[in-house]
Amino acid sequence: MSGGKFAGIDIGSRSIEFVIVDDNGVVLCSQQRDTGFDPVCEARELVAQYPHDLLMATGYGRSLCEVEFDCPTVTEIKAHAKGAHASISGASAILDIGGQDSKAIALYASGKVKKFEMNDRCAAGTGKFLEIMATNLGFPLDTFGDAALEAQEEINISSMCTVFAESEVTSLIARGADRKAIARGLHYSVIRRAAGMINRISDSGDIIFTGGVAKNRCMTTLLAKHLQRRVLIPEDPQAIGALGAALLAMESTSG
Amino acid sequence: MNSPHEEMWKKLGLNIDSHNALLQVLGGAYGDIYLNQKNRPKGMEYFDFVLSEIHGQRIQELLDEQAAGRKIIGSYCVFVPEEICLAGNASLVGLCSGADFAMEEVEKLLPRNTCALIKSTFGFRLGEVCPYLESADMIVGENTCDGKKKAYETLGTILPKNNLYVMDIPQMKSVEGRALLRGEYVRFIKAVEELTGVTITVESLREGIRTVNTKRAAMHRLLKLRAADPAPISGLDALLANQVFPSDNPARFTDSVNNLCDELEKRIEAKEGAFPAKTPRILISGCPMAVPNWKLPAVVESSGAVIVGEESCVGERNTRNQIDDSGTTIDELIDALTDRYFKVDCAVFTPNNDRLQHIKEMVKAYNADGVIHYGLQFCQPYLMESIPVEKALEDAEIPCLRVETDYSMEDMGQLKTRVEAFIEQLQ
């Protein structure tokens, strides 16, 4: 479709991303807002504000969109694979850590999904975990990673469960442990879990890191160090799912 | 609403309020999941009826037979031979274990990290909602996994009629393993004879073997028809037939399955299906799905794929392989019977390479595009085996998704995303 505009919307547990591409896949618009308690209302505003020819929805709220906008949907697995491969080619795997879930996706050279792993029911090892821990330690979320990187040592945190880790952190604080060192330990515990997921599906090659947690410098540094593999961050790591959905919308019209 | 069966349930000692609540949930789920399906074969009406009367008319029928002197034997496992029960003038029924019930009571007796199937067994007893369990003259437990083996010790203490019989099951496919299984079947014959007062003869055992062979042959006919594209029947409907297999009257069940198959053959000829041609085809492999556990198949078939086979005890593991009925002595028939059951490739066996082979054969036979390995949370044998299964399938370039879940609905979102993403992978 010449001159067409294709939209992708990714409704996650924490944020909604909205991307529009032209018929060459070039990003024309990228928006983000909090999911809040009424994701349909938020989505409706975005969709109305930016005119487009076709919309594709992804993320945990995709079925809400399907009902609201009568649009096709795609899972966040396929959308991330599409978006990440379009942003950075040649990687063998994607790690996506979002607000309340995390996934590792292995790719064929063509960018197609080869295999994937997702975290199970709880939010252990996700953005939510880091957010709660940052609050406990009194760090703003956007500098939590930098503070952890400055730590002189690393305190091992054994609990992955958010509730158990909270009490572990509380007792470490009570013992007078350095809060940066605790922060680093917390980051490392998320890395160990993420690395386990990646290793189960892919054993070599570059990794594209997406999702809000990819903006945390400590996470990207520790991940590369732990896996001894190159970790690449797309320009706007949170928008990759929406970008993928928009690109899939575009492809769906080109037969 | 008063059911015409309420008197009967009261006499059996069921908790009427809880039982009504269970039936209501069951009926609701059945309506949503089953009756909403498109393009169902007409032959499924029989199974709809059986399910609607699974705690009603079928129980009445068994109780009438019981009043006339026939015994009811309840079982939880495909290793318990129906042939022997029938030969001893007893009916074998599968016992309820496919839904969470009375969990607070259950967790007083079992560790929380016990698989949903075992917990359900206890829940139906403690909640007093399983008419099969309450009416059975003998309950057969079996030493398959450690969970069941140890749970039976406790179950034995809460059965109202104190009528638990435990069968030992080998763990290796060796000469000694086979001898153990054969010995257990000889012991079971004696136990059935003692229960019913009927001596099992060459004739009656052969008759029992023939009845069950015919039933298995009908089911196998059904399973093979699912190889067609478009699939003539949904996986949910085929699963229902598998689920009813151990509870229904054998002869009537066999006829109904054969009628269904006649219809499906015509559908295949007319290229009609439950789903359009080229719908992604999935084989489910792993833990059994007892009534009313329709969770995973409902997710799969509402996400744009069709299930074409169940490598499961509620499925092909129970229905394949016939018993040679040509023996002329009891010993020969018991040998033939043992040979059939010894082929069951349950994950409690080690090693269990036959199962890997069988999964691959089924993928080929039913033209499946991928396999979803279904493991119940805390089911060690199947969860352990799921990793080598996945590896073997990947080596054979067959896509595989490992799913670990239970009977609760809390992981439906994640489950749906996983299954949908797997289906996208197959397209």
Image (cartoon, coloured by chain):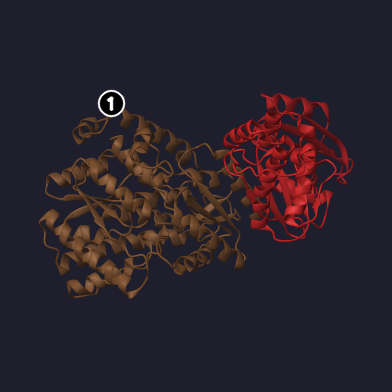
Chain colours: A red, B brown
Picture residue at 57% right of the left edge, 40% below the top? A121
From the viewer's perspective, tell me whether residue A218 is left or right of residue B44: right
Q: Quadrant of the N terminus of chain A?
A: top right
Q: How many marks?
A: 1
From the viewer's perspective, tell me whether residue B142 is left or right of residue A194: left
Q: Position of residue B172 (x, y in %)?
A: 37, 68
Q: Position of residue A73 (x, y in %)?
A: 69, 40
- How dense is the environment of label 1, judged by Cα within 10 Å: few (below 14), some, or many (20 and up)? few
The chain letter for the residue carrying disc 1 is B
Q: Which residue lies most toward the left here?
A: B197
Picture residue at 26% right of the left edge, 43% below the top? B132
Question: Of helix, strand and loop, which one carries label 1?
Answer: loop
Question: Relative to B410, is B369 above or below?
Answer: below
- Report if residue B370 is visible in the image: yes
Q: Position of residue B290 (x, y in %)?
A: 39, 47
Residue A214 found in image quarter: top right
From the viewer's perspective, tell me whether residue B285 is left or right of residue A152: left
Of residues B320 and B4, which is closer to you in this image? Answer: B320
- Report if residue A75 is visible in the image: no
Picture residue at 13% right of the left edge, 54% below the top? B196
Q: Which residue is mark 1?
A: B2
Q: Position of residue A12 (x, y in %)?
A: 69, 35
Q: Which residue lies most toward the front here?
A: A176
Under mark 1, the amino acid is Asn
Question: Relative to B83, is A61 above or below?
Answer: above
Picture residue at 20% right of the left edge, 73% below the top? B331
